[in-house]
Amino acid sequence: MTNARATGRHLPSIAPAVVLGGALVILCLSTAAWADKKDKKAQPGVTPIDVTKLVWPPPPDVARIRYVTTVNGEDSLNPQPKKKSTWLDKMAGVSLPSDSGKPRTRGPYGVAGDSKGLIYVADVTTAAVFVFNLEQKKVTLIGNQRLQVPSGIAIDDADRIFVVDSQQGLVFVFRTDGSIEGTFGAGKFVRPLGIAIDNENRFVYVVDAKGNRVDVFDADSYRFLRVVGKPKTVDQLAPEVFDRPTNVAVDSEGNVYVTDTFSARVQVFDADGNFLRMWGKPGTAPGCFMRPKGIAVDRDDHIYVVDSEFNNVQAFDTEGRILMFFGDRGDQPGTFTLASGIGIDAQNRVIVTEQWTGRVQIFRYVTDAEAKPEYEKVAAEEKKREEERLAREKAAEDSAAKKN
């Protein structure tokens, strides 16, 4: 039996407009209308989760997110049977090594994927970028000789790797072989954190968390272009005003989404830096936030926001209407402890980092096009049931009329 804690709770699925025609809007409530936030530990005797069936929303709804795997280093890609201590080991006081000595993620934050299917994870504790090759089951490191506190990471359409170093106040640009192509941003930041690239318009967006702004650079020349947003004054939470923004993402139209973390909201700007809209506020209902951090956009322009307090991921449409969420607090697959970063790659993998446990969890987004046949099947079944119901009612009416 699947542990109910890991299935999460769900809202109406992310649905293509051609099938459902719209999305449900959930009002933010200040009451605990959301989820039981107690951190329940796994109890002895609980049946292990069947991860092959771990999906959101759960059946009978059409699945839109599927759990794939969890990684933290090469050992997680090549698991070995755990060697048991013998009585002789115990008598001699020998303890078996619990770690192979191979590097593993200990404080993963930013995450991104390249065109070849490689997954890049910026680890603030290890001071390096982990490169996961899931196909070959290998892990390599880049930047471990130059980086101090790598946080945000983004990859452009030429597979150049842009890494924000929060300590040095720089953006490093690495080639795929790990060599440095260049750096930029010196003297521009107070405390940079998140980063995103608009490949179409050739913009690089760097979130300056302590500077309360987003700096925009040319993706090719690294030339500074402009600032998006304004630092707040006392109790000022007007549009375009940031209070500790952390991360940024770009949709297919070039619109820019920024997690305004201390204001518990998402702010949206166009490619020219003009304010468009914002959504979210503090609260415990779906659609509200407590500590929004990582943000990403899938190929259908759904916006995913990681909340490190809720330890879940909420998905919205571009107008800020909530569509679904997945995750909860815990250490099982599909649950998180201090969830922080998120990235979505060309293979539709949704990758979420956890700073407390050092885990990197990988999910698979079922696209609108892939889900459409299932929605049509559900709609056809509902139509058939309705027709059968009407036929039964008609037969009952005809029978009653004959008796009279």
Image (tube, rainbow, N blue to C red):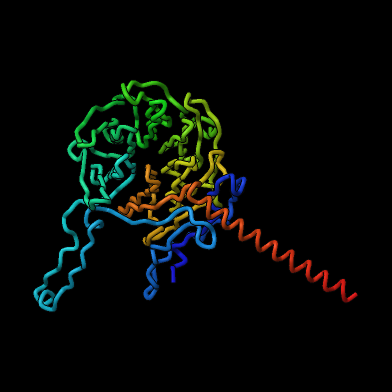
Quarter of the image with the C terminus is bottom right
Relative to 386, say whether 341 is above or below: above
Q: Is residue 24 shown to the viewer in this render?
A: no
Quarter assignment of residue 202: top left
The quadrant holding residue 400 is bottom right
Residue at x 82%, y 69% (from the top left corner): 397
Taking depth in this image into account, of 82 and 282 the one nearest to the observer is 82
Quadrant (top left/top right/bottom left/bottom right) for the N terminus: bottom left
As displayed, is residue 12 above or below residue 166? Answer: below
Picture coordinates of residue 376, whole percent (x, y):
57, 53
- Residue 183 x %, y %: 26, 27
Q: Which x, y percent locates residue 49?
A: 39, 67
Residue at point 53%, 32% (across, down): 236
Q: Residue at x 66, y 58 (%)?
A: 383
Q: Nearer the viewer, residue 252 or 95?
A: 252
x and y, in percent, of residue 158 in the image: 30, 32
Q: Is residue 175 visible?
A: yes
Nearer the observer, 71 or 240: 71
Along the viewing direction, whichever of 22 and 255 lies nearer the viewer? 22
Residue at figure coordinates x 29%, y 25% from the top left? 186
